[in-house]
Image (cartoon, coloured by chain):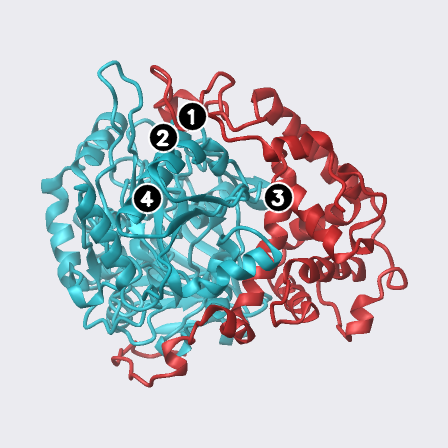
Amino acid sequence: MPHTTGSEAAAADRAPSPGGGQVSPGRGHASPDAGRAAPFPADHPALPPGIDRRGFLRTAAGGTAAIALASMIPAGCGADYPQATQDGVELQALSPKEYAVLRAAAEAILDNVPVPPARIARRIDRELALAGDPILTDMKTVLTLLEHMTLLGGRLRRFTALDAEDRVAYLHTWARSRFTLRRAVFQATRAFIYFFAYCDDATRPITGFTGPWRERVEIPAYPVDFGEVV
Amino acid sequence: MIIQGTHRTGDVRDRADVVVVGTGAGGATLAVYLAERGWDVVMLEKGGFFRAEDFTQREEDALADFNGRRGLDTTADNAIFLNYAEAVGGTTVHYWGDSFRTPPDRLQRWREKFGLEWMTEEELAPHFDAIEQELGIHIAEERLLNENNRLVRQGCEALGIEAHIPPTARVDCIGCGWTQFGCAYNRKTSQLITTIPRISKSGGRIYSDARVERILVENGRATGVEGVLVDRATKAPRGRFRVDADLVVLAGGALGTAELLLRNFDDPTVGRRFYINPHFWVFADFGREIDNVSGIPCAYVVHEWRLVRRTPSGEYAGGGYIMLTSHQSPGITATMLPETGAAHRERMRKYRHLGSLMSVIDEDHPGRVYLDGGVRKTEFRLQGIDVLKAVDYLKNASRIFLAAGAKEVWIPDVYGTVVRSEQDIQERITARSVQPNAQFCAGSHLLGTAPLGTDPRDSFAGPTGEAHRVKGLYVADGAAVPTSVSVDPSLTIMGVARWIAAGIHERHGRAGV
C-alpha cells in the first residue's frame, strides 16, 4: 500500500474550492506596465486549495533546496544500477542511475502499453543527448529527485527499489502535490515517457490511429522552385 | 540561392544591403518586399532547410527537426511548453495557417499605450491586402471541417455563441490534417514555399543552419552580424560566418530575437514582456468514433469571449480568450491526457472518440525572457485576472461540448476532472486545474520581447522598427509586437513587418543608407 504524508494526501483529496472561478470586486486587469502582480494574491477567491501566498514562497524556497540537494547526491555507479548494462544500452546522455530511474518510471507508467520500457528509456536518452542543455540538466535533476525524495512520501526505499504498485502510488502523490516542484517533476517524467511511447507504432492497436497519410496514400506535392540550393 | 550551412566547411563572408536574421512570418515578409525592389538581401536562419519530401508527418520527427529545442522547450518551472519553429520559413512551417487581421481594439491600445500612431486599420490595410492575396488567404472550405469542427459549431449554434470558420493560408488543401508537422504537399502557403523562393530568385542568399551570435556595431550603427554555421543534427560548429550590411533586421521570433539582443546589449527593455497566449485543452468523449484527425486542425474559432467582460462596477465577468478547435497526434495527446497506468491507457483507447478545444488566453500579465548562466530561459506564470480567464474558458468549452452531445468532458488536469452537467461545471472546474504543472499547458503565440514604442524606457525600438539606441538595427517579428494580439498573430506579424519594410525602402532607398 502506498505511504503518503498526511498533508499531501489531504491537499490532493480536498474538494474543489467553492469559490473557484468567481470574481471579487475590481480585481485583476492590472496593466503589464504597472509591475508584475503576485501569483494568486492571498485574498483571491479563486485560490487553489492549499495554496496561499506564503505557500508559493515556501514552494519556491523548497524547490531551490531540493535542487541543491539533488546536486549533492552521488551519481551512483554502474554496479548499483545495472539496468542499462542489462538492457545492452550504450548511454549517450544519462548516467546508469538516471537511466534506471527513467526505466523504472516507464515500467510503472506504461501499464500494459505494448512498448518495452527499456526501448522508451533508450529513446529518451538519445533525445536528451541531442537536445542538450537546459533540457538535459533539468531532466537529470528530475530523475535524481524522483529517486531520492521517496522519504517525503514516507517510504524508506528509493524509487527504483519500490515495487510497481508502490511506484505508481508514489508518482500519484507527486502528481497531486500542492508543491509546484513535485508536480513539475511528475509532469516532466510522464510527458517524456508518454510522448515517446505513443509515437511508437506499437501503440496503434490501443488508439486506433491509422498513421500519417504519407504512409498510406501517395499524393504528389505541388512543385516549388527554390532556385539554386547548395 | 539557398545555402545550407550544414553542408559547408570553413568560414563564409558575405555582404548585402540588408541582412535579415530569421526567415519566418516577419523576416521573410520584410525580405521579399525589399528583394523584389532591388535590395541585395541576405537571410540567416538558425534552423535547417526542409522541403515537402522531408515532412514525414510523424510527430517525433517534426518536433526534433524544426521545433525549437527539439520541441522540448518549457518555461523554467516546466509548467508551459513553448512551441516555436527553427527552420527556413520559421513558425509558418508548422503553424495552422489561421490568418486574422489585427483586431481594431488592439491597434487602438497600441496607439494609446505605446504611441504607435501609425497602427491604424487604414494604414495596415494595403499590407494585409497584399499578403492575403500572395498567400491565397481565404475562408476555409466547408469540406475541410472535420467532425470535431462540426460538433463544436453545433454546440455553439445551440448556445447562440459567436464563432466562425477562420481565414486560412492554403491553396487546394487536401485535408490530411498534418499541417503542424510541415505541409508534405505544398498546399499550406507558408513562407517556405511562397516568399523564400521569390527571395532566392531575386538574388537573395538564404543561409540555413546559421546561428547568429554577435551584432556588429560601429559608432552607434549596426554594420552586420557574425556567427556559426552548424551541423543540422548535432548543432556542432562547422565554420564561422560574417555578413556586413547597411541595415540589420532582427526577425528570429520573440525568443530568438530576445536571446540575441540579451547576448549583445544591456538593455532593460529586452525580454521584459513575454506574451504566449496560454493554451489549455479540453477534451470531449462523444462515446463513438468521430473524425478529429483529418481536415484542417483548426477550422472553427470561437470568438464570443475574445474581450473581457465587466460588470458595471468593473468586476471581471468573463471572457478574455478565444477557443480553437484542435486535433492532436497520439504522442502529444498522450502527454496531455490525465492519469497514469491503466487509467491513462483506457483514456488513450478513446483517442478516436475525442473532440478537443484549446484556449488562446489574451493575457494581461506577461512573462519574461532572460539569460541564466549564459542559457536562455523563460518565466511565465498565470496570475491575477488571467487565472479567471482560464477557468472561465474551461467552463465555457465544457458547455459547448455538452451542448454538442458529448457524453462527458475531460479537464485534463492531475485531478482527472470530468464533467457531465452544468452542475459539474459549477462545482468541479476551479482554479486548481490551471495551477502550474496541474495540466498540460502550451504557448505558441510568442510576442513582445523587443517591442515597438515611442518611449525608450519601455520599448526597444521606435515606431519605425529601428532600435532606439542603435542606428540601422531593426526589429520586425513577433518580438516587435507590443502585446498579445488576442487572435493568432501570424498575419499581424506579417503586416507589421511589411509596413516596416515599406518604411525602410522609402527612407533608405535601394542603395542602402
Nearest-to-viewer mark from 2 and 4: 4
Q: Would you say the residues marked 1 and 2 are in contact, meaning their CB atoms lie under 8 Å apart?
A: yes
Q: Would you say the residues marked 4 and 1 are in contact, meaning their CB atoms lie under 8 Å apart?
A: no
Residue holding disc 1: B384
- The amino acid beneath tag 1 is Gly
Residue B267 in percent (x, y) is at 46, 33
Q: Residues within 10 Å of mark 3 (few under 14, many from 20)?
A: many
Q: Nearer the viewer, residue A42 or B146?
A: B146
Does A91 sit above or below residue B315? below
Residue holding disc 3: A175
The quarter of the picture where residue B150 lies is bottom left
Circle 4 marks a residue in which chain? Answer: B
Mark 3: which secondary structure?
Answer: helix
| Residue at position x 55%, y 70% in the image | B233
- The amino acid beneath tag 2 is Asp
CA gap, disc 1 and disc 3: 24 Å
Q: Are marks 2 and 4 on the same chain?
A: yes
Q: Residues within 10 Å of mark 2 (few under 14, many from 20)?
A: many
Residue B451 in percent (x, y) is at 35, 37
CA gap, disc 3 and disc 2: 28 Å
Q: Nearer the viewer, residue B217 or A46?
A: A46
CA gap, disc 3 and disc 4: 24 Å
